[in-house]
Amino acid sequence: MYARGPIVDDLAARVRARVLVRIVPYLLLLYFVAYLDRVNISYAALEMRRDLSLTDHQYGFGAGIFFVGYFLFEIPGTLLVETWSARGWIARILVGWGLVACAMAFVRTATQFYWLRFLLGAAEAGFFPGVLVYLSHWFRAEDRARAFALFMLAVPLSNVIGAPVSGLLLGAHWAGLPGWRWLFLLEGLPAILLGVVTLFYLTDRPRDARWLSATEKTFLLEALAREAAETPVAPGWRSLARAVLRPQILLLVLAYFGIVTTSYGFSLWMPTMVKSLTHLSNLTVSLIATLPYIAGGICTAIAGWSSDRSGERRYHAIVPMLMAAGGLLVAIVAPTVSGWGLLSLALIGAGIYGFMPPFWAMPRWFLSGAAGATAVGLINSTGCLGGFVGPFLMGHLKSGGAGYGPGLAALGGTATFAALMIFLVRPPRRIAV
C-alpha cells in the first residue's frame, strides 16, 4: 500500500506519463481511422448521391443505418475487452471494418449502400466503448477524463485532416473510377494494416506490461485494485442487469442518445448543407467543414483538463451541450457562410465534442468490472441509435421542401434534452462534484 506523499505523487505522475505516451497516441490513431471511415460518407455524398441518384430520404437512411448495426453488436465487445483480450478484439474490429469500408468503393445501388453501411456499423461495433473499458484498466479515476480527452481528439482531427484529403480525392478520376470510389478504397486500407500492428503493439493489462518497471507496475495495480474495491460490482447476470438498468445509468443513456442524435444529424449533413447553400467547390466546402472540428478539438482538450483538475463532471458536460444547441439556433438564422454562420459552425463543433471527456468519466462512478463494461456498452450502443435518428430526421424534414431549418431546430432540441438528462444525474456522495 502506497501512502500519499511527495515520493508517491512523483511515482503516480511518472506512471501516468509512461502509460499515456505508450497507449493513448496509438489508440488515438486507431480512432482517427475509425471515425474517418464512419463519416467520410458525408464528403463522398457530394458526388456519390448524383451518381447513384440517391434522394434526401435515401441518403439520410443509409447514412444513419450504420448505427443500427453498431447497436446490435456492441455490448458483447465491451465484455470481451474486460474478460478476454483487448488487443485481439480491437485487431479483429479493425480488419473487419477496413474490409467493409473498402467495399463501399464498389456500391452501385441504394440497397447495396444500405447493406454496406449496416455492415460497417456491425464491424466497428465495440471499438469505442471497448477502448473506454481498456483505458479504465490503465488509468486511475482521477486521470481518466484527461486520457479520454486525448483519445477523443481523434474525432475532430479525423475531420480536420480528413476533410481536405477527401475533398482532394473527390477530384481524382483514376483508372476510370470517380473520386468518391477512391475515397472509400484508400481511406479503408489503413484499418486493415493497423489491425495486424495492434496484435503486436497493444498490451492487454498492466501486469503484462514489460515497459513498466516492477515498482511502477505494482503501484498501478494496487491503485486500480483499491478503486475497484470501492466501486459497486454486480455478481451474476441477474444482478448485472439490475445494476446497469439503474436510473442513473438510464439517464446517461438518454443523454448520450440526445447528443449523438445532434452530432451525427449535423456532421453527416453539414458538407451537403454548406454546398447547397453556397455552391462552392468540393475542396472549398471540405475546408470550411474543418471549422467545427478545430473548435471541437480545442474544447475537448480544455474540457478534459478542466474536468480532471476540478473533479467536476456534470456541468463540464452540460455547458458544451448547451453551446451546441445555441449554435444550431444561430445556424437557422444565419445559414450562409457569413461571420454568424461560421460562428454557428464553431459553437456546434465545440459543443458536440467538448462534452465527451467529462461525460465518459461518469459511468464508472456507479459500476466497475463486468458491470461497468456492460454499462459503458449499453450507454454507447443504445445512445448511438441517435446516430440513425439524427441523419434520418434531417433527410425526412428536408425532403418535405422545408429546407434545413426544421431539422436544425430538432437537433437543437435533442442537444438541450441531453443537457437536461445530465443535470438529473446525481453522483455518489464519495465523488467530488
Image (tube, rainbow, N blue to C red):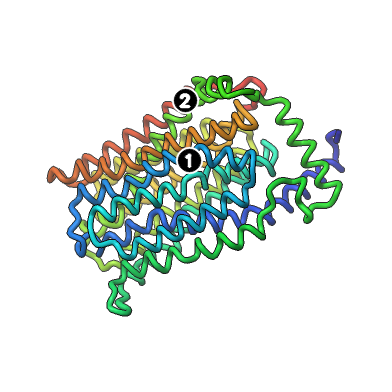
Q: Could you say whether the residue bearing mark 1 is in a helix, strand or loop?
A: loop
Q: Is residue 294 visible?
A: no
What numbered label is drawn on residue 74? 1
What numbered label is drawn on residue 250? 2
Residue ID at (85%, 35%): 2
Q: Could you say whether the residue bearing mark 2 is in a helix, strand or loop?
A: helix
User: Is residue 179 rendered to the left or right of residue 81?
Assistant: left
Indicate the position of residue 175 as horizontal and vertical percent values.
31, 79
Residue ID at (30%, 43%): 330
Question: Do callouts 2 and 1 mark residues in contact (Cβ within 8 Å)?
Answer: no
Badge 1 crowding class, 10 Å Cα cut-off, few under 14, some 14 to 19, many 20 or more, is: many
Indicate the position of residue 410 as horizontal and vertical percent values.
27, 36
Question: The disc labelled 2 sits on which kind of residue?
Answer: Leu
Q: Quadrant of residue 294?
A: bottom left
Indicate the position of residue 394 as horizontal and vertical percent values.
25, 44
Disc with the residue nearer the chain's start (2 vs 1): 1
> Which residue is outermost to the bottom?
175
Question: The disc labelled 1 sits on which kind of residue?
Answer: Glu
Q: Is residue 71 above or below residue 340?
A: above
Residue sitting nearer the eye, 192 or 43:
192
